[in-house]
Amino acid sequence: MIHLPDLIQDLGFILITAAIVTLIFKKLGQPVVLGYLIAGFLLGPHVPFMPNVQDTNSVKVWAEIGVIILLFGLGLEFSFKKLARVGKSASITAVFEVAFMLSIGFIAGKVVGWSSMDSLFLGGILSISSTTIIVRAFDELGLKGKQFVALVFGVLVVEDIVAILLLVLLSTMAISKTLSGTELVFSSFRLGFFLVLWFVVGIYLLPLLLQKIRKLLNDETTLVVSLGLCLLMVMIATKVGFSPALGAFVMGSLLAETKEGTRIEHLVTPVRDLFSAVFFVSIGMLIDPRILIDYAPQVLFITILTIVGKLVSTTIGALVSGSSLRHSVQAGMSLAQIGEFSFIIATLGVSLKVTSDFLYPIAVAVSAITTFTTPYLIRSSDTFYQWLEKRLPEPFLKGLERYQKAVQGEDRSMIVTKLLFQAYGLRILLNTILVIAVFLFSKNLLLPFLKQLFEDSTWINLALAISAAVLTVPFFWAISFGAPSIKLNEQNRVRVERLSLGVQVARSAYALLLGAASVNILISINSLTGMAIFTGLFVSVIAGRFSEKIYGRLEKRFMKNLENNIESIDLKSQVPTLAPWDSGLADFVVNPNSQLVGMSLQQSRLKENFGVTVALVQRGEESVSAPDRNWILMPHDRVYIIGSEDQLLSAKIALENPRADVTSSETLQSFGLLPIQLLENSYYAGKIIRDSGLREAISGLIVGIERAGQRILSPDSALTLAPGDLLWVVGDIEKIKNIRGK
């Protein structure tokens, strides 16, 4: 008789049960993740009338793979570029929210009489919102075009990075039972060091690798290569002392920056969904109804604390970062839940045996309840904002508006320290990390390997020190003599030139100290040999012209990969914001069944009916900026329009837009939204818009004007431009930059 392994039988029960339960939840319009948790509960040891999982250890391994694939998929969705686009606002919001919830969670745990370790882990569990639940809720509610979604996604990325740091710190505390300030600083520095290192090396190497093998990449090989790279990064992260989840997330983020990122994300999605199902089902198996009954008051208390605490902390954090009240409230209500990272933190406490048995099922119960409430909170967020706005004092609202405008406005009087950091600091920081990485790699990996290979190991340290010094000469040159890494305007350029002598002395002194410390990693700098290597290193830096050429080629390749490696640009996902206005740029595809098909733009009355402005139309390979009123709308035209969220939503309904991917083209890559400040002697000042020639000069149009504190959206073509006007224009980016100041 053929014996069927328990694992296969268990997976069969898991997937069949999950399929039935999730289909029911889908039919009822409930989150699928909640269905997975219920399926796991039914298959767990606490439900006697259902088939139970036998090989629990193997299922746990599958669940760990599920966490890895889940985080890999999240990395593919939230790249470093997306984080950079909302980095300041998202970082402030996320850090404030995490710190607030960590504190509130710890206090709440102590209030109900839990131990310090249980209370600390509770704070960590409540700190991190669920990316999976939010993304699925946005998909199901059709909200990915909303402007506040960009802020939410940015917060989620920062939260994921903070969660990795929390895992490191909680692990350390669980083992040592203490946490010193020095330990916290060291762990944070170590995490930041490796994240920057992986980002720089990954951006440089991955696009080059994929370009070399592109002809060999079909769907099958692309999937295998991407998952292989994911697991390779998991092994590297684990090797240097971080969690596998961090490695998976980082590799996903790096692959998202390549030309194959969108394709990889599409191919990985089914695999991610499969393993995610196993992960969430395994979480549900740990739900003990007796514990939930015994701790029902605590579950209810923590659930309310989670929803209210995250709403308040996220809203305040977003307001502090300069977001509008509307977007802050919407973000707060979107992030009011816990999810996959909370499970991972709870699992850490269980595996290290430092938390009580009741904490894990309570965390799962709170997650299940907040998962259920999330779609309703998101759906009602705008209604709640309108209710709140009517009840807030008018002076308070005006103060918020002034604060938001001040935070979002340009800093024209840049302080010297900020100017110097922008000019030199980032380059020095990145090259410092590369130098340290080369010497540490030589000591920790190459040195032990070579000593095992060769019996006579006296020469190995010397050889590695010389090799590392030679490899890092271009990086030391960039630290010592590299030009400013940003283009400066005339005023700031003069300020930097005045400081050039002091800056050069400081950079050279720093490079000398870094060189001595780096050489000392492999060979004593106090020895004659060490001093010889150190001297040779800096003679090469100062006298060797090859350093500048080599570094120039390296930096050029890196910047090319960073700026031009995405073939398709999703303008809708970027949703550029019009300064402090609640307006943005979005694209929709004209449905063949739309009532607007065959109409000219004038006949469609898009501007009159919905208040939107058509900025660009793409038809096949043809892209037309600022089409005139006689342009005929045809099926499958991609129309880029400017308007507020409500206006864009109304226009979307009229166009009956089915979601589609944006096809790349040079025209779209150079098309964007930028401001132009009209000076006193500006060529365009005093001219009527339609006669100014600005439309032809930028291959676009004016979509908004800021004048003396007033905002004019979609200005009339008969309006006269005045000195001091801040024009918001859509058109060819290079042409716009060329006419600034005219």
Image (cartoon, helix red, strand yellow):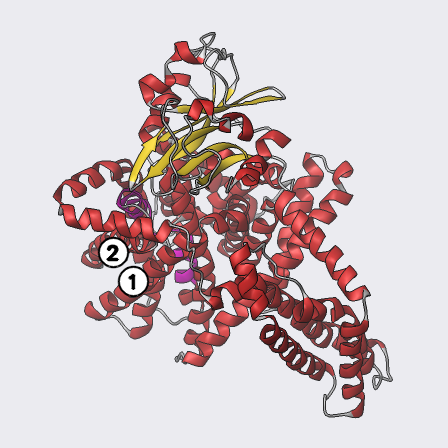
Write down the residue under mark 1.
100
Q: Which residue is drawn at 59% across and 54% down?
A: 487
On the image, the x and y values in percent for residue 523 come to 74, 85
641 and 155: which is toward the camera: 641
Asked if residue 736 is positioned above or below residue 598 in the image, the reply reads below
- Residue 275: mark in rendering: none
**Quadrant location of the N terminus?**
top right
Q: Main secondary structure of the magenta part?
A: helix
* Residue 198 shows in the view: yes
Q: Residue at x 36, y 47 (%)?
A: 41
Q: How crowded is mark 2: few (under 14 residues within 10 Å), some or many (20 or more)?
A: many
Asked if marks 2 and 1 touch (Cβ < 8 Å), the reply is: yes
336 and 605: which is toward the camera: 605
In screen coordinates, is 414 left or right of 194?
left
Q: Is mark 1 on a helix, strand or loop?
A: helix
Asked if residue 212 is positioned above or below residue 463 in the image, the reply reads above
The mark that comes first in sequence, 2 or 1, is 1
Q: How crowded is mark 1: few (under 14 residues within 10 Å), some or many (20 or more)?
A: many
Q: Is residue 14 magenta?
A: no
Query: In the orientation shown, which residue stands out farthest toward the front?
Result: 681
Question: What range is drawn magenta here?
Answer: 325-347
Q: Residue at x 41, y 57 (%)?
A: 91
In screen coordinates, is 111 left or right of 192?
left
Q: Which residue is drawn at 69% across and 37% down?
A: 220
430 and 677: which is toward the camera: 677
Q: Give the CA distance from mark 2 to mark 1.
A: 8 Å
Q: The disc labelled 2 sits on which kind of residue?
A: Gly
On the image, the x and y values in percent for residue 49 come to 35, 43
In screen coordinates, is 329 left or right of 52?
left
On the image, the x and y values in percent for residue 674 come to 48, 39
Q: What element carries label 2?
A: helix
